Image (spheres, rainbow, N blue to C red):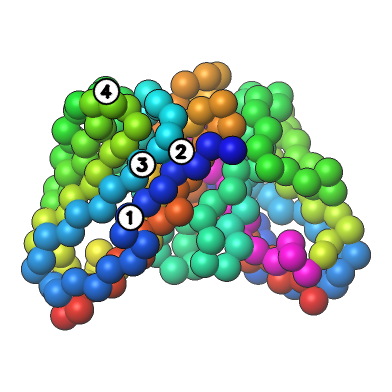
Amino acid sequence: DSGVTQTPKHLITATGQRVTLRCSPRSGDLSVYWYQQSLDQGLQFLIQYYNGEERAKGNILERFSAQQFPDLHSELNLSSLELGDSALYFCASSVGGDGGSYEQYFGPGTRLTVT
Amino acid sequence: GQQLNQSPQSMFIQEGEDVSMNCTSSSIFNTWLWYKQDPGEGPVLLIALYKAGELTSNGRLTAQFGTTRKDSFLNISASIPSDVGIYFCATSGTYKYIFGTGTRLKVLA
């Protein structure tokens, strides 16, 4: 158990809908990262938040947005969902994140299925 | 964009055999991380490398950060069935937090 929690574990929704994925980082970690993993693919970095502020942005679509709250949990919002958005979405956390490489600890993921 | 290429893509090995896989990049990085992912679960950090030429061990795992800082390898000695999974190398750079294409390992008992 990495200490990172994600909810829900599974989510099935229809095209055009909007969903919110939630992540709680390990105790003491200030950074939260979101990744997308499509079937049998590698991990694509979406976005990072550090202590409530956006720190780095990867290949995140404009239909997706995220935020990190004062208690450091984070939410990833996916809107106008398309079939191609079906994937595993992982959250990771690390102690630092203000530059450099930090060891990231991953949650169990949310499997999103868009029908 | 920046990319990490892993080889081999997949491999079948017999239980007890040693395994070697590597990760290469066209860019220089200052950190290399190795993760293992079991099906349907999140990646788990195995080894972190912060110094070029550094050789680091974690049980049966050994990893090294190449002196060119453009590559890294991971060795697993005396493989066991629970070594099955996908192994990813990772690093950070301008495009932030890049993961390799993965090496899928299957162990035959």
Q: Which chain letter matches label 3?
A: B
Q: Are marks 1 and 3 in contact (CB under 8 Å)?
A: yes
Q: Are marks 2 and 3 in contact (CB under 8 Å)?
A: no
Do the residues indicated by labels 1 and 3 lie within the same chain of the protein? yes
- Image position of A55 with respect to B17: above or below: above
What residue sits 78% from the left and 69% below the top?
A83
Where in the figure is residue B63, as x and y percent of width and height? 21, 41
Q: Note whether residue A1 is visible.
A: no
What residue sits 51% from the left and 28% below the top?
B93
Where in the figure is residue A3, as x and y percent of width and height? 47, 46
Q: Nearer the viewer, residue A22 or A56?
A: A56
Q: Is B37 positioned to the left or the right of A38 in the image?
A: left
Q: Are marks 4 and 2 in contact (CB under 8 Å)?
A: no
Where in the figure is residue B59, as x and y percent of width and height? 14, 48
Give how far apart the Cα atoms at labels 4 and 3 are. 16 Å
Q: Nearer the viewer, residue B48 or B72?
A: B72
Q: Nearer the viewer, mark 1 or mark 2?
A: 1
* Mark 1 lies on residue: B7
- Image position of B62 with respect to A70: above or below: below
Q: Which chain letter matches label 4?
A: B
Q: Is B2 positioned to the left or the right of B29 in the image?
A: right
* Mark 2 lies on residue: A104
Q: Which residues are magenta?
A: A83-94
Chief secondary structure of the magenta portion? strand
* Mark 3 lies on residue: B24
What residue sits 65% from the left and 63% below the top?
A87
Q: Note whether residue B25 is visible.
A: yes
Give how far apart the Cα atoms at labels 1 and 4 are. 22 Å
* Mark 4 lies on residue: B51
Quadrant assignment, res B24: top left
Q: The residue under label 4 is which amino acid type?
A: Lys
- Image position of B48 with respect to A82: above or below: above
